Image (tube, rainbow, N blue to C red):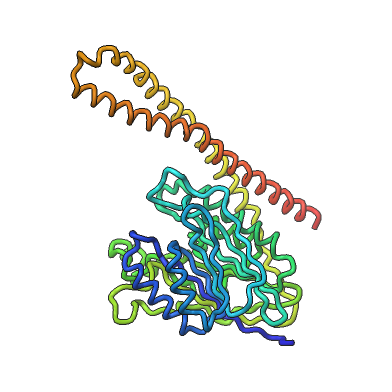
Amino acid sequence: MMDEINLRVLTLNCWGIPYVSSNRRQRIIAIAEKLSFGDYDVICLQEIWCRNDYKIIRTKTQETLPYSHYFYSGVIGSGVCCFSKYPIQDVMFHKWSLNGYVHKVHHGDWFGGKGVGLCRLRINDANVNIYNAHLHAEYNSENDEYSAHRILQAFDMAQFIRMTEQGADAVILGGDLNTGPQDLAYRIIKGVASLADACSIIHNDIGTSECANNSYTSLKVASKLPQGKRIDHILYSGSKNYMVQIVNCQQPFPDRVPNKSFSFSDHEAVVAEFKLTRGTYQTLETDVRESLKEALSICEKSLRDIKRQRIWYLLISLFIAIPLVWSMGFESTASSIGIGISIALNIGRLLSTAILCYSLFMSSIWNCVEKNALKAGYLAMEIRLMQLNNHIIKR
């Protein structure tokens, strides 16, 4: 029986989007090479969208990290996978119920079926829950249309961790959470799941995205915030059986792939070193009530927006349906209006029908899906807030 466990955990968003990510294959090979020589116990990767990229990394790290798992989800896979030096006892994947928009093909979050993956590891005598997550991206900081999605994903994940951590001696969450230390989603994750931040504890507030030293960061973005934004995190918690202490937290990769002019990814890797010892961990107490109230108000606004969007889509459907039906009257005079006009008319009908079907889909099926997902998250947050208020009153 060992009373002390040393654990090195790495997380990295690999930016592995086929046909889109620059230098993808070269970077994946370089990442695999770097990971195979690094002294890591657990690795959490995100945006491994290509099955062959996962195979490349798995093959290269097989000797040092013999256990691995890829979390399949959505249309193209979750992009989330884990590699471990220790046996994986159980796995589970929780997909977000609110996960972007199906019609936003250029964003692609919905097609990835993003969520949080859980690998339970057996490390000597300890059960360690490793959570690997990728939250919805923020595509426009000034007008973030996915703010409610990300907040509900954050709360959903925090609840998932709370409800699956029973029996675990330690909990570690790594991933691209797409939220900074001052953001609402981050505060909800930490507060609801009672997690500590590895980098914040040792006062190492390193940037992980849009950093000036990254080859994929534009000069315009780099000039505004050279240190970048810290949206990739490693959070942790102990138990009544094990103390968990953070020893170090840093960026282990160099600025560039060796002998190349580009970086390993458009994100920076983060590695945290932990020491697990026998003893009782003092759970981090954070008052998350104000954060939940703020989240509820954002959800209320989103529900109102969804109602307005439904009305607009119905109006668009009506405006398209009327001229589409009216154009059917031209069929009897098709021979007299000319072949060119007839072809143009049929093309116009085809496009109008496609737009009509899209508008009807958005006003009915998709509107109901998003509304119900928002309501489910809203009610769950209300219940949690009520319990926290009751707990404060009883104390």
Give the x, y percent position of residue 250: 48, 78
Residue that extends furthest to the front in the rendered view of this protein: 335
Task: Tally the numbered discs.
Answer: 0
Give the x, y percent position of residue 35: 46, 79
Q: Looking at the image, is 257 positioned above or below residue 360?
A: below
Q: Looking at the image, is 153 positioned above or below residue 312?
A: below
Q: Is residue 26 left or right of residue 94?
A: left
Which quadrant of the view contains residue 343? top left
The quarter of the rendered structure image containing the N terminus is bottom right
Q: Is residue 199 visible?
A: no
Image point (47%, 77%), residue name: 59
Which quadrant of the view contains residue 89? bottom right
Image point (57%, 40%), residue name: 300
Which quadrant of the view contains residue 286? bottom right
Asked whether 23 or 161 is in front, the reply is 23
Give the x, y percent position of residue 117: 58, 63
The quarter of the rendered structure image containing the C terminus is bottom right
Image point (38%, 32%), residue name: 354
Asked whether 388 or 243 is in front, the reply is 243
Q: Is residue 293 visible?
A: yes
Residue that extends furthest to the right in the rendered view of this protein: 394
Q: Looking at the image, is 315 positioned above or below residue 151?
A: above
Give the x, y percent position of residue 116: 57, 60
